[in-house]
Amino acid sequence: MTLIQAHLPVCQFAERHRLLVTAHPADLLDAVTLPGTIDDAWVKRLISWRELPGRFLSRFGSKNALGRRAAFGIGDFTLLGREDDLEIAFGLAGRFWRFDYGLVPLRGPEEFDAMSTAGVPKLVLNFTVEASADGRTWLCTETRVYCNDRSSYFRFLPYWCLIRPVSGLMRRRLLARIRNAAAKTAPSGHNALNKANPRPFTQC
């Protein structure tokens, strides 16, 4: 069983993308957590636009957490674990449609699994590596979201429809950045760069 299946076996929303590269699986998963790999300036700009209304309103007394926190990023996720050189997974819980995402602080995989507050969706983002038939490696990412009641489902649904196209672009860029980071840090000759071959996956 994969980490994403173990921590979020049921979901109503999902997307999957993959990139075919010449790289060692360990180098790819190591690159996920390297400082700077996730810090895409283009993605940061999109997030700043998404947060702009909330930050503006917070200056005029609106009660949201954006006025007290940095921009949303990978640091807001909880590491759920790494399975050898096969998979690494991160978890997040919150009311994502809110200006400040309504995040619930989680201190580890146990708290993520136990979190069952009504109306608070849970999200798992993972990265996996798979051998291709030609000897290269598929670098894959999947995102799953589970809403635990009807209210949160129907609140999240329009938000998902709105962000899904942008989310796909962000994840494809992220896969390319992981590939590039792995190429830079791997031993000489261990990596070679290849073009993307994204394949969307839209259901659980």
Image (cartoon, rainbow, N blue to C red):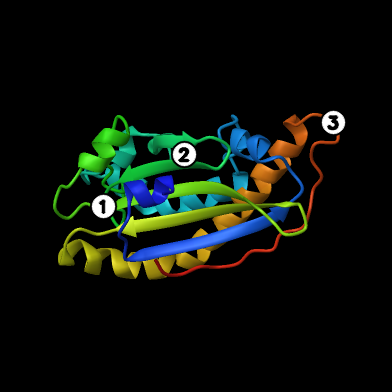
Q: Residues within 10 Å of mark 1 (few under 14, many from 20)?
A: some
Residue 72 can be seen in this image: no
**Camera-side residue: 55 or 164?**
164
**Residue found at x 47% / y 63%:** 15
Residue hosting label 1: 95
Q: Where is residue 2 shown, x and y percent of the image?
A: 44, 48
Task: Identify whether 119 is placed above or below 60.
Answer: below
Q: Which residue is disc 3 drawn over?
A: 188
Mark pair 1, 2: CA separation:
17 Å
Q: Are marks 2 and 3 in contact (CB under 8 Å)?
A: no
* Relative to 16, 179 lies left or right: right
Q: Is residue 8 above or below residue 178?
A: below
Q: Residue type at mark 1: give it.
A: Arg
Camera-near label (2 vs 3) is 3
The residue that disc 2 covers is: 74
Q: Residues within 10 Å of mark 2 (few under 14, many from 20)?
A: few
Secondary structure of residue under mark 3:
loop
